[in-house]
Image (cartoon, rainbow, N blue to C red):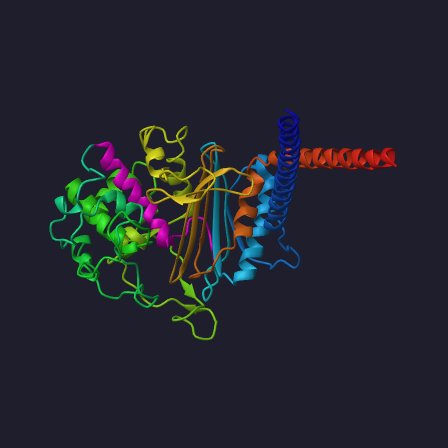
Amino acid sequence: MAGLNRIKFQLCMSGAAMNKTTHRILKGLCYCFAILFCVFILGWQIFIYQTEKIDLAALPVLPTCVSTIDSVYLNQINRSRNIAQSLMQLRQIPGLTIAVSHNGNLIWSEGFGWADTEQKITACPKHQFRLASVSKLLTAAGMAKLVEQHRLDLDADIRVYVPEFPDKGSPITARQLAGHQSGIRHYRDDQEAVETKHYRGVIASLDKFKDDSLLFKPGTAFHYSSYGYVLLSAVIERSAGKDFLVFMQDEIFTPLHMFATAAADTAGAYAYQTKFYDNVTPYSWDGSIVESPYADFSYKWAGGGFLSTVEDLVKFGNAHIPVLHAGFLKNETPQLLFEKGTMPDFIPGIGLGWMIARDPYLRKVCLHFGAGSGATSFLAIYPEEKLSLAILANLGHAKFTYEHLIGIANPFLDDSIKAYLILFDFLIILIASAFIWGKVRKRSQSK
């Protein structure tokens, strides 16, 4: 009996020791989690600080051309204007235009620098610029209109519409083309992106890539592809029963009063068009700014061949904000375009044409960039803030910096999360102080 009691006692003691060890491990894990969380919040705030850290000293004196300024937003406009000029100085951009719309109203549109450096023509919001890949958003809207009209099935084999496109062994769908999951290649290099041959239509332009092998089985991977959008334009043309450019004019540009938007090779009648410039290889070998080479965009209208103005682009952006689209799209259609699969909301992703992300202040933003010979473009909408922002430059591959883009948008957006972060900092300091004081007091009492 005494031996049995001794065994029971030892088991109880070992159990108590295990409970103590478990308690210490859990306590340590809680401390580690709390420290990591605080480090994350601190890192987040440092990231926000870095995105707002832009040198505005010694800004260049540039000619400007104002179209619209809402005096209610004058302070915000002045802040964004300085950041825009800083971007132009940093990237040596000859001419740049900006437009901002809030609650469906144009509140600011202005041009900076030169539309034509030789003739000294000031860049104005009325000037047409190349959209480069922002053109894909216009094409995606055309696709969405056909889906609404039940004339295009996003998940049908595209050869139902375009039997001329060769069988690749696996069906390709319009959804995969719009979401860059078709396996169709992109340009091999920048030289390929400057074509001089004219194609008679979107079906003819398929010759550029239709016989090339797929990079992967459709739907199994992601690969950004402008040629995928060229094929999508052929699908649109066939399902619409009319020429692709005629369809885009009738269904997108005219209803949205985008009267300055057109395919690059058909826009000769428009009176105001900027000159186009490059300062990177293979267009400029020494970094100097040169006029862009001649290019025929009939091979990629849908993927990068439209011209437009910033004011037209914010109209287009507004048409994708549910409370502002005024019947242009059905209520569920923007959600279709902005759907990025099963990824969590805080992870950036690609929808149908649009890129979807959260900015440093956790505000949802839907956007697209464009870059090509003679063009750098940017369109963003903040659906929850009812804000559209368009920026166009006549310098190819100008590489707008993240800090400048956020800096231009920020003055017009809600940044109340800053107050919550400051409150969180205060609480962390308070809790840390109480914890340290408690430890010091406990040690002093134990002595």
Residue 426, how many percent across, how many down? 72, 35
The foreground one among 219 and 129 is: 219
Is 232 located above or below residue 120 in the figure? above
**Residue shown at 82%/34% (left/top)?**
442
Against 268, residue 409 (above or below) is above
**In this picture, residue 210 sits left or right of residue 271:** left
Which residue sits furthest left? Answer: 163
Query: Which residue appears at 18% of the width and 54% of the height?
Result: 201
The location of residue 92, given as percent across then percent down, is 52, 63
Total marks shown come to: 0
* Residue found at the very far top of the displayed protein: 1
Q: Specify whether 434 is left or right of 342.
A: right
Q: Find out whether residue 232 is within the magenta segment.
A: no
Residue positioned most to the bottom: 286
Tell me if 75 is positioned left or right of 180 in this view: right
Q: Quadrant of residue 339?
A: top left
**Residue 361 position within the rendered picture, expressed as x and y whole percent measured from the top left:** 56, 39
Instruction: Note whether residue 266 is visible.
Output: no
- In this view of the protein, which residue sits in the foreground, 319 or 438? 438
Image quadrant occupied by the N terminus: top right
Location of residue 278 by image quarter: bottom left
> In this view of the protein, which residue sits in the foreground, 154 or 415?
154
Asked whether residue 70 is in view, the answer is: yes
In the rendered view, tell whether residue 252 sits above or below residue 163.
above
| Residue depicted at 26% across the width and 38% down the height | 251
For the stretch drawn in magenta, what is the main secondary structure? helix
Q: Position of residue 188 (x, y in %)?
A: 31, 65
Name the foreground residue: 123 vs 304.
304
Quadrant housing residue 17: top right
- Taking the spot 73% from the left edge, 33% from the top edge, the residue there is 431
Q: Quadrant of the C terminus?
A: top right
Q: Magenta segment, which residues? A: 122-149
